[in-house]
Image (spheres, helix red, strand yellow):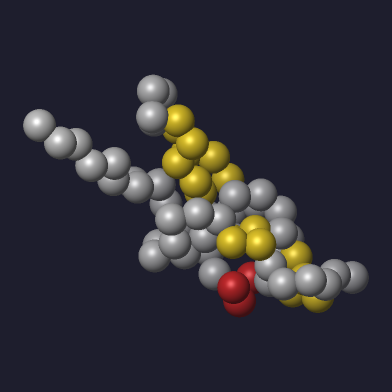
Amino acid sequence: MIFFQIDWCNPGYLYVDDLIDKCVPCGIGFYRTNNDMKCIQCPNGQTTYTDTATSAAACQGIV
């Protein structure tokens, strides 16, 4: 029998542990959409101001 891991974490969160089924925030400077399997880092000179950003639009210039 073959099992497939389903990424059930909400956007902005990443699945990190098969044993305890835990989702953690991507972190400041990263985002994750519903279509991404991992958190994506904002381009150089940009960051997010939340640790659960859900799109590249959340990447803003660093002030």
Residue 42 horizontal/vertical position (percent) = 69, 67
- Is 49 placed above or below 1 here? below
**View extreme (left): residue:** 1
Q: Quadrant of the N terminus?
A: top left
Residue 29 horizontal/vertical position (percent) = 71, 59
Residue at left offset 39%, top offset 23%: 19
Quarter holding residue 22: top left
Residue at left offset 79%, top offset 71%: 44
Quarter holding residue 55: bottom right
Judge left or right: residue 37 versus residue 54: left
- Is 5 placed above or below 57 here? above
Question: Toward the viewer: 11 or 37?
Answer: 37
Judge left or right: residue 50 versus residue 44: left
Residue at left offset 72%, top offset 72%: 43
**View extreme (top): residue:** 19
Residue 38 horizontal/vertical position (percent) = 50, 54
Question: Toward the viewer: 5 or 58?
Answer: 5
Judge left or right: residue 26 versus residue 10: right
**View extreme (front): residue:** 1
Quarter holding residue 34: bottom left
**Number of marks in picture:** 0
- Is 14 placed above or below 61 here? above
**View extreme (right): residue:** 63
Residue at left offset 23%, top offset 42%: 4
Q: Can see residue 50?
A: no
Residue 16 horizontal/vertical position (percent) = 49, 36
Q: Can see residue 6?
A: yes
Q: Quadrant of the C terminus?
A: bottom right
